Amino acid sequence: WKDPEPTLRYVVCMDSSQGVTDSSDFDVATVLCVQPPYVEHVATWMGRVSQHEFAREGANLAEYYNKALIVPEVVESSGGAVLMALTDIIKYPHIYAREDGSYGWKTTKWSKGPMIDAFKESLDRDLFRTYDERVAAQMTTYEAHRTSAGITKVGAPRGAYDDLLMTVMMGCKVLPEINRSKPRVVHYGRTKW
């Protein structure tokens, strides 16, 4: 929706799927413009490709958006191959690191709630903007639901997707941390935020 502006900073948040079939989730990369206190969603890449190809697409997108910081989601079932491709094959120099020094955003049952809360706060304070109607559509279906095992989970109901929304929520959670910190160089010349 918007091309990069040379004076602005951008973040590319990436959510990788676990496959390339027509029924698998999508690989999604969203570009968020960092204009404190606002979060503006300016571009989206969405598809079903191998994790290495997805890493390449994310790196290309980040390079185009002023060498943006990449925030890849890393969960137990996916994301590790994307992170490995970004760090060890592509050698992209700007990757988000958590407080413990590990790269990528890790979605867990403990981090998901604060991530959702950060996004809700951005909405409540009218600080989030998107041009992607698919994000708005995913917001309307995102809910708490019970699994067949009786566990309550928050996410898209069966047959719906939440990939775009997850990347936007990740960005809303990590942006305040990124804005408060100064980058520092770590191993292989990568910049840690």
Image (cartoon, helix red, strand yellow):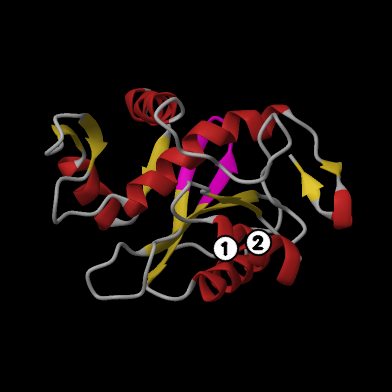
The structure residue drawn at horizontal position 58% and vertical position 67%, both measured from the top left corner, is 55
Tags 1 and 2 touching, CB below 8 Å: yes
Q: How far apart are marks 1 and 2 (CA)?
A: 5 Å
- Which quarter of the rendered picture does the N terminus lie within? bottom left
Q: Where is residue 127 in the image (x, y as percent from the top left)?
A: 43, 32
The structure residue drawn at horizontal position 14% and vertical position 50%, both measured from the top left corner, is 158
Q: Is the magenta stretch mostly helix, strand or loop?
A: strand
In the rendered structure, the answer to whether residue 79 lies left or right of residue 49 reads right
Q: Position of residue 139 (x, y in %)?
A: 23, 42
Give the residue type that dot 2 points to. Met
| 193 vs 29: above or below | above
- Badge 2 density bin: few <14, some 14–19, many ≥20, Cα 10 Å: some
Residue 37 inside the magenta-drawn segment: yes
Marker disc for residue 96:
none
Q: What stretch is highlighted in magenta?
A: 32-40
| Foreground residue among 9 and 88 | 88
Query: Where does label 2 land, which residue?
Result: 84
Give the residue type that dot 1 points to. Ala
Q: Identify the element where label 1 is drawn.
A: helix
Total tally of numbered discs in the picture? 2
| Foreground residue among 105 and 13 | 105
Residue 149 inside the magenta-drawn segment: no
Query: Where does label 1 land, which residue?
Result: 81
Q: Where is residue 149 in the image (x, y as percent from the top left)?
A: 15, 35
Q: Position of residue 6 (x, y in %)?
A: 70, 58
